[in-house]
């Protein structure tokens, strides 16, 4: 009885800790992530951002600042989907007296490994942004697509990927933390870091192209951020998550066609 109480308390504390990380990350992004412009001013509900009037100017920022912006945004959007694995990992370690003392450190390393993979993704996204913006495909001030062809290509790529075997495989790993932990979990702190990196790799494989849709709707568009976060959670947590992914794929393809026609 006492063990169950302690485990329940630890899960609550860990859940609150993860919620604080996500909340602070969203707050940082909403305030502009150091860009000097509020994300609320960069938010629009348009389905076809390339038709929006462009705002003159170039909201630049150092390379490190933009990487940090992408990374904090990924922390806010992707940490909730990793929470079931982290909580399960904590519960398993808490039941083993040999590992209970280091359970919190192990969970921190698991999360760190997961987020390190998204840091690598953020570096790649920043590099791509630095190509798209000078080429005129991305608004210099609002950071959304200025090209119907570019928007359609990215929407179609993300849509077809939703139906691909790679998507199904990666999503299966993300949706079943019990099977993932059973297959890949190993004792030790280094193993926890590696476990987080492995899970992060599958998560990028599952959601990387969806996150790239921020280049269409606006990198700092809070509405798009909220919609994509909700979509990722539905895919990972709902019983019909795979069906959600497939329906989303069809909608994205239809959206790509509509983008070329409007």
Image (cartoon, helix red, strand yellow):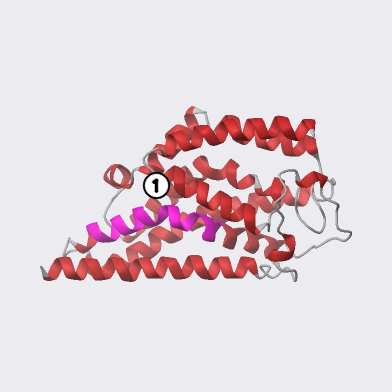
Left or right: 6 with respect to 248? left
* Front residue of 136 and 53: 53
How packed mark 1 is, by other alpha carbons closer than 10 Å (few <14, some 14-19, many 20 or more), is some
* Front residue of 61 and 54: 54
Q: Position of residue 211 (x, y in %)?
A: 60, 47
**Where, quadrant-wise, is the C terminus in this rendering?**
top right
Number of numbered discs on residues: 1
| Quarter location, residue 119 | bottom right
Q: Residue at x 26, y 55 (%)?
A: 187
**Image vertical order of residue 69 relative to residue 2, above or below:** above
Q: Position of residue 57 (x, y in %)?
A: 87, 61
**Where, quadrant-wise, is the N terminus in this rendering?**
bottom left
**Image vertical order of residue 170 relative to residue 82, above or below:** above
Q: Position of residue 136 (x, y in %)?
A: 85, 47
Left or right: 68 with respect to 35? left
Find the residue positioned furthest to the left: 1
**Image vertical order of residue 140 relative to residue 254, above or below:** below
| Quarter location, residue 32 | bottom right
Q: Position of residue 205 (x, y in %)?
A: 51, 40
Q: Residue at x 81, y 52 (%)?
A: 139
Q: Residue at x 89, y 59 (%)?
A: 56
* Front residue of 163 and 239: 239
Left or right: 140 with respect to 234? right
- Secondary structure that dominates the magenta span: helix
Find the residue positioned furthest to the right: 56
* Residue 202 is a magenta residue: no
SS at badge 1: helix
Q: Which residue is mark 1?
A: 237
**Image vertical order of residue 112 relative to residue 230, above or below:** below
Left or right: 11 with respect to 77? left
Q: Residue at x 73, y 32 (%)?
A: 258
First to last magenta residue range? 74-92
């Amino acid at each position: 009885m006492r063990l169950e109480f302690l485990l329940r308390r630890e899960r609550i504390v860990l859940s609150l800790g993860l919620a604080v990380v996500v909340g602070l990350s969203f707050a940082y992004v909403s305030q502009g992530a150091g860009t000097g412009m509020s994300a609320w001013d960069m938010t629009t509900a348009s389905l076809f951002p390339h038709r929006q009037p462009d705002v003159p100017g170039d909201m630049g920022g150092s390379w490190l600042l933009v990487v940090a912006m992408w990374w904090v945004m990924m922390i806010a959007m992707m940490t909730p989907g990793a929470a079931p694995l982290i909580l399960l990992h904590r519960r398993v370690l808490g039941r083993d007296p040999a590992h209970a003392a280091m359970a919190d450190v192990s969970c921190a390393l698991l999360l760190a490994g997961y987020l390190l993979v998204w840091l690598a993704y953020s570096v790649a996204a920043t590099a791509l942004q630095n190509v798209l913006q000078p080429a005129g495909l991305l608004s210099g001030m609002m950071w959304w697509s200025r090209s119907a062809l570019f928007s359609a290509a990215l929407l179609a790529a993300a849509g077809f990927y939703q139906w691909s075997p790679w998507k199904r495989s990666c999503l299966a790993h993300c949706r079943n933390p019990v099977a993932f932990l059973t297959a890949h979990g190993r004792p030790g702190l280094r193993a926890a870091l590696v476990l987080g990196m492995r899970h992060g790799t599958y998560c990028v494989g599952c959601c990387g192209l969806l996150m790239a849709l921020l280049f269409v709707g606006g990198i700092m568009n809070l509405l798009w951020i909220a919609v994509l976060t909700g979509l990722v959670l539905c895919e990972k947590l709902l019983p019909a998550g795979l069906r959600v992914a497939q329906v989303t794929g069809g909608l994205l393809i239809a959206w790509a066609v509509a983008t070329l026609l409007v």
